[in-house]
Image (spheres, helix red, strand yellow):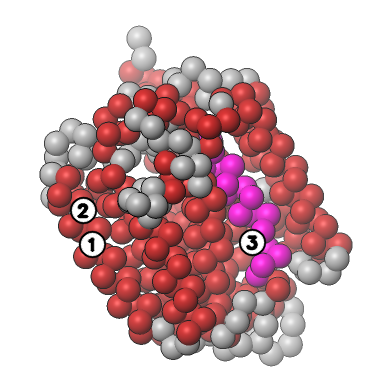
Amino acid sequence: MTGFVRLARLRFLLYNLLPVGLGAAVAVHQGYDLDLTWYAVAQLFAWTVHVMTHYCNEYFDLDADRANVYFTPWTGGSRALVDGSVRPVVALGTAFVLWSVAQLMVAAMPSWPARILGTVTVLLAWFYTAPPGKLNYRGAGELTVAAILNGLWPAVAVVLQTGGVPALLVAILLPTALLQVVRMMVMNLGDRRSDATVGKRTLPVIIGYRRAVTVIVAAQPVAYAMLTAFALAGWVPWLVWAPMMATAPLSAWLVVQLRRGAMADLDPTRMTPVVFWASNHVSLIVAAAMLGVLVDAAVQPGSGSGLVVLSLVLAGYGLLFGHRLWLARRQAAGRVARQP
């Protein structure tokens, strides 16, 4: 049972609170009352698709994970299939069950736009590693993750509330999606050697280590410049821009670490903090966007109870993230103490 739970990689599900919450927050910002039922459906749908993807990936990525001896707590899979804790067929069977559940949730959605977006989400998530798509084996994995996490999930959430996708949400998501693409490139940098041996052509494998680092570094100022341009154009409120810009120091730290070669020698000790903060950088900028949207909505007349619900969700995320950070620091201290 422990191995089966490891396959789910539950630590990654915390992020899902943010894109779904952001979509719902934008709906409230646009003057809609929060429909708690459809908000819950959007959240459960995101979790279901995410866990489905993990079980699916573990099965179809097994050869790559077996070849990976440079894995970290955030890369290289759960290792539950690699160490024999769970049979591969169990992972695949669970993925099919979750796929069916996700499709039932899509069928229950109240409008065709929501159903279409939900269907595209499930298909992209499944074919991320499953044949015949195998998107992450053909240089499209990083874009697929960004399309789902920083596009389709919040889009489904807002469509379930409003029936459409407001321009505000698109303007917020575009710079975060760019950061999500290069965040996945950071993750794949750590797997590049084993991926190459099994024909898994992620972007770092295709373009090489040095070019991948150049792309990741260049994308950081581009994303924040894009956000600032949208604010100057009036597409993103300044109360949203300000907390999102406050995450820029994490970008600067990531650039420094990559320039110093933290991912160059595939040393798990050096790679772990980089992949940890690359992932949480994207989480924090989406959390900052959600905070800004809620604050901007609160200063407008007629703000309703939806603000309270979503504020509690964001606060809950903050507490859970704080606990995750505490655990990460404790684990790092333990590794240092064990070193000779």
Question: Residue 278 or 264: which is nearer the viewer?
Answer: 264
Q: Residue at x 59, y 42 (%)?
A: 182
Image quadrant in which you'd find residue 199: top left
Q: Horizontal placement of 292 versus 101: left or right?
A: right
- Is-magenta flag for residue 218? no
**Type of amino acid at the residue the image marks with label 1:** Phe
| Mark linked to residue 173 | 3
Q: Over which residues does the magenta segment extend?
A: 169-187
**Type of amino acid at the residue the image marks with label 3:** Leu
Question: Residue 256 or 81: which is nearer the viewer?
Answer: 81
Is label 1 or label 3 in front? 1
- Circle 2 sits in a helix, a strand or a loop, which is it? helix
| Mark linked to residue 88 | none
Split into 4 quadrants, where in the image is the C terminus? Answer: top left
The crowding category of the residue bearing disc 1, from other C-alpha atoms within 10 Å (few below 14, some 14 to 19, many at least 20), is some
- Circle 3 sits in a helix, a strand or a loop, which is it? helix
Pinpoint residue 327: horizontal percent, then vertical percent: 39, 41
Q: How far apart, in angstroms, are the residues tagged by discs 1 and 3?
A: 30 Å
Q: How far apart, in angstroms, are the residues tagged by discs 2 and 1?
A: 6 Å
- In the rendered image, the residue lying farthest to the right is 232
Question: Residue 270 or 319: which is nearer the viewer?
Answer: 270
